Amino acid sequence: MCSIAGMLSIEKNRIQHISHKLNVMNELQKHRGPDDTGIWVNQQRYVGLAHNRLSILDLTDSGHQPMKDVVTGNVVCFNGEIYNYIELKREIGCVFKTNTDTEVILKAYEKWGTDCVTHFKGMFSFVVWDENNQTLFCARDRFGIKPFYYAVVENVFYFASEMKALLPFLSDIETDMEGFKDYLTFQFCLGEHTLFQGIKALEPAHCMVIHNKDINIRKYWQVFYDLDWNHTEKYFIEKLDELLHNSIRYHIRSDVPIGGYVSGGVDSSVVSAMAADMAGGQYAGFTGKFGISRLYDESMYAEDVAYEHDFPLYLIDMNCNDFLNNIENVIYHLDTPVAGPGSFCQYMVSGLASKHRKVVLGGQGGDEIFGGYTRYLVAYFEQCIKGAIEGTMDSQKYIVTYESIIPNLTALKNYKPMLKAFWSSGLFEESDKRYFKLVNRAPLLHDCIHADMLNDYDPYQKFRDIFYAENLKNTCYFDNMTHFDFKTLLPALLQVEDRMSMAHGLESRVPLLDDELIEFVATIPANFKLKNGDMKYIFKKTMNKYLPESIKKRTDKMGFPIPFNQWIKNEAKDFIYDIFNSEKAYSRQLIDNKKVYKKIENESDFGRNIWGMLCMELWQRTFHDRKCEYKGMLNTRM
């Protein structure tokens, strides 16, 4: 829902042409909110807020933003949804003039101050201008579902939902070296890093207060792994079912009909099955396939879910021409290169969904919180073998034995190249080094990078800090791995979820990311999540009753694969080769695209190296090569 943007002179100086600048920011983000637009500027013209609205709750003009409280003078600019706004109205107890969750933020801030964020259940990024204290309060939801970026240029604090809206104000558009190293390593940035020098991300579960020249950032929420060894599997199943039901009930609150992405996997299928049962015939599902091959088509599983829970399913059949016609739009809306080609699929399915719904539910988060990635099994199996050899299998860090894992190792049958590479060096090293090796993509492309351009920043150190975070005391290896992905990979995936849906003016909600649900799952011992090598055991055990038999029995979940590596050797060959074999590509300071060009024909069927480099090159073309266009927007009156 919506876009937010704004600026504040931290020295309280008048900002020249402030209304025009706010309009430029709104124009760059107008796809996020096609229903309404607004700006607010204070009389002294040193602070201004801008908003584009996608109307979901209270569809009347009373939901217009930025929204001002006539009593306090406070002004809010908000992107997202506060799902418990009805309950908060009762708790706050004052008279409300609208039926919006936006007004609830204003009243909650008046009642609780900056601690209001701890009362919100939802996805959000927002700012509140506090007229009395002359401060700007900024906050982002616990998981990073909704984005918040900022930059300080010549004593002016700028913020926006998307980085492109900040580009006109930077002195130059350059690549951030630490962000670039993160991208090479993980194919996403860690912490507050971005790939644009001068632009930072407000991290999930953080808020910020700007007062005069002081910018104070604090974390307001953390998940703690206080493991519950006192309850049984039956208790965990019943509680998990209850909490997910509660989350779905909140997430289907809307004044417009809702739908959902249905990929054919467990997570999205469970969300859609439960939501459809609760929505009373108003639900619709959306999925996609690549008709080129059964290897790239999981739509039959989505059809089974739709049939069992009686909702219509809309399908888009994608091909290489769709890719060629849309990939540059994908990169433009993403603002940054991304880890995998699934972003293209999400863009296409979101486009389909936007023709029928304004709100969709998705299954993001299940793999990170319950442990669904195959690499967890790869890494854990190695450590089990190590423990068996060393005679330390009875230590707390081993949740299952290597003997019990063996029956489930068939999940690794398509990962032999990964296993061969992973075990080729460093076998039985410390667990953090081994997992870093699994997620580190930099060695695959080291010969394509101009290393002399890089600084001394080492992503491994930040990786290690997250892997061994204080909230992980007395946990096992499995928890360390999933926690790292929860804190890093998940926000990167949520960025894709947000951008690809908002590119079409579509709101995407993620019910698996509910604070009570996440806090509870963190107390479940890992032996219920990876039971005998069965990944996501407790989640699947809980949710099987909502799933058709075809999905319960699946052992081949592919994660919405895309035939990109087939295309680059066939239909998209000329396009890909032309991208890398060009004067622009060869002029890049950081990447040797001549070497990338030579690697194209040797890319494996499921390799991501060429995809990663293609995204990087298209990103540079879209933003770096057009820097004059972004700067010129400030000189063109709209």
Image: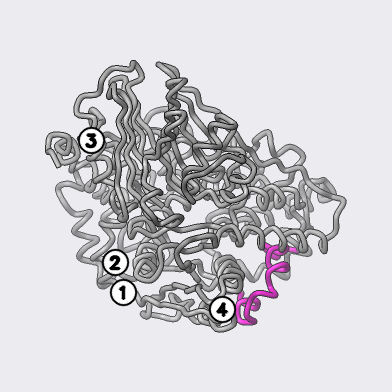
Query: What is the spatial separation of the Cα atoms under label 1 and label 2, in whole angstroms?
Result: 7 Å
Residues at discs 3 and 1 in contact (Cβ within 8 Å) = no
Q: How many numbered marks are there? A: 4
Residue under circle 2?
Answer: 323
Specify the segment rendered in magenta. Answer: 532-554
Q: Amino acid at mark 3?
A: Pro
Helix, strand or loop for disc 2: helix
Query: What is the spatial separation of the Cα atoms under label 3 and label 1, in whole angstroms?
Result: 35 Å
Query: What is the spatial separation of the Cα atoms under label 2 and label 4, in whole angstroms?
Result: 27 Å
Residue under circle 1?
Answer: 319
* Closer mark to the observer between disc 3 and disc 1: 3
Q: Amino acid at mark 2?
A: Phe
Residues at discs 1 and 2 in contact (Cβ within 8 Å) = yes
Residue at (28, 60) in percent of width and height: 327
Q: Residue 58 vs residue 490: left or right? A: left
Query: What is the spatial separation of the Cα atoms under label 2 and label 3, in whole angstroms?
Result: 29 Å
Residue under circle 3?
Answer: 168
